[in-house]
Image: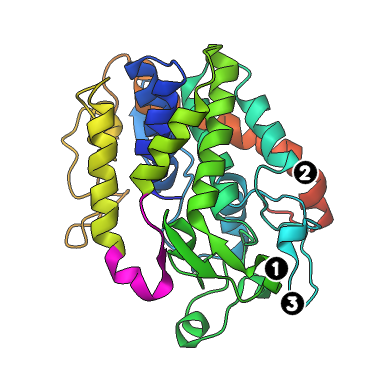
Amino acid sequence: MNIEFHYYLTKYLALKAGFTPDEAEIVAYSSQYVDDNSLIYDIQAEDENYQNYISQTMNIFKPKKKLMRIYILFHFLPGEPTAASSSRKDGKMHVLNTTQASTHATEIFYDTTRSDNLYSLGIASHMLSDTYSHQNFIGTFDEMNAMKGLWQKLSPNIGHADAGYKPDIPNLIWEDPRIVREYSMIDNKKRVLQAAHKLYRNYLLITAEPNNWTKLKDEIDKIIGESIEEKDLKKYPKQKENRIKKLKSLLSNYDDDNDYDEFKWFKDTVQEDVKFLKDKKFPFDPVKDKFTFKENYKKSHWFKFQEAVKDYQRIASNMLRPILDQMEIKEW
């Protein structure tokens, strides 16, 4: 999934499930920020420095073991390797293969969200929704991720790098050539609706509001619009823009602040003027760019999110430990 789902649609689902606008914003921002939380900061905090954990990395060429925690825990949660929809033409299976709403994903979601922590709910929502869009990919370097073609040969076999952005485009119908014919044609719209339904039902377990999924499903279906095929990919940027406009229009009935700024929470937390963090001309330098917290930083959204990331990582790592030990993954 991308920002269309992780922020805008997640916020709408939370609102329709009965969360207040402020609560829905925390859930949705946390969900999207999992993808944008890619910088490690060392921030002056009282008597010691505070360092966050990242939940995404933009450098997929880092050593394999350094990526394990990030990709497997947050974006490619291992599922059911024997699932029928994972049947491959080469007959191979992998214990780290991602499948939708797997037992592991569901248990981690519920364990992470036992408290009233909305930041944890957003992080778990990201993980769970990605199990739908990232089905049949593995969150580490593995030949089972590989697809044929020149671009695919040039890109590393990690996650869905070989498939590009195709798994994350909400209205795309595309073919996964690795999968047997019965399951090889992928309808992303169907996956988006399934993921939305799953999140909505999970949110209702928290809010105890009436279930209005039938009406909500029709709204989402119309927002996603007509499906496109791979030959029509050039239409995607404009369609994405239009879908976000439609979602913003719906969200405006609840909240006027619906523009996502990936640096907002961080800027609200530190004293310094935040600039050039991801600027190619003036890149962020953790050695030269020193930050100090504002007063009461522990009450800030950014700090609470970072603590939730650490808590989520602990819960997910412990639950997946048998698999990781089986794979002899020592550096974790």
**Residue topped by disc 2:** 321
Task: Identify which residue is drawn at 34% across, 43% down.
Answer: 223
Q: Amino acid at mark 2?
A: Arg
Marks 1 and 2, how far apart at CA = 33 Å
Where disc 2 sits, the SS reads helix
The part of the image, by quadrant, that contains residue 90 is bottom right
Q: Amino acid at mark 1?
A: Glu
Q: Position of residue 176 (x, y in %)?
A: 59, 71
Q: Nearer the viewer, mark 1 or mark 2?
A: 1
**Is-magenta flag for residue 229?**
yes
Q: CA distance from mark 1 to mark 3?
A: 11 Å
Vertical relation: 132 (above or below) 119: below
> Which label was assigned to residue 89?
3
Which of marks 3 and 1 precedes in the sequence? 3
Highlighted magenta segment, given as a residue range: 225-235
Disc 3 + disc 2, Cβ < 8 Å:
no
Q: Report which quarter residue 66 is drawn in.
A: bottom right
Q: Are marks 1 and 3 in contact (CB under 8 Å)?
A: no
- Pick the front one: 60 or 172: 172
Dot 1 alpha-carbon crowd within 10 angstroms: few under 14, some 14 to 19, many 20 or more: few
Sequence-first disc among 3 and 2: 3
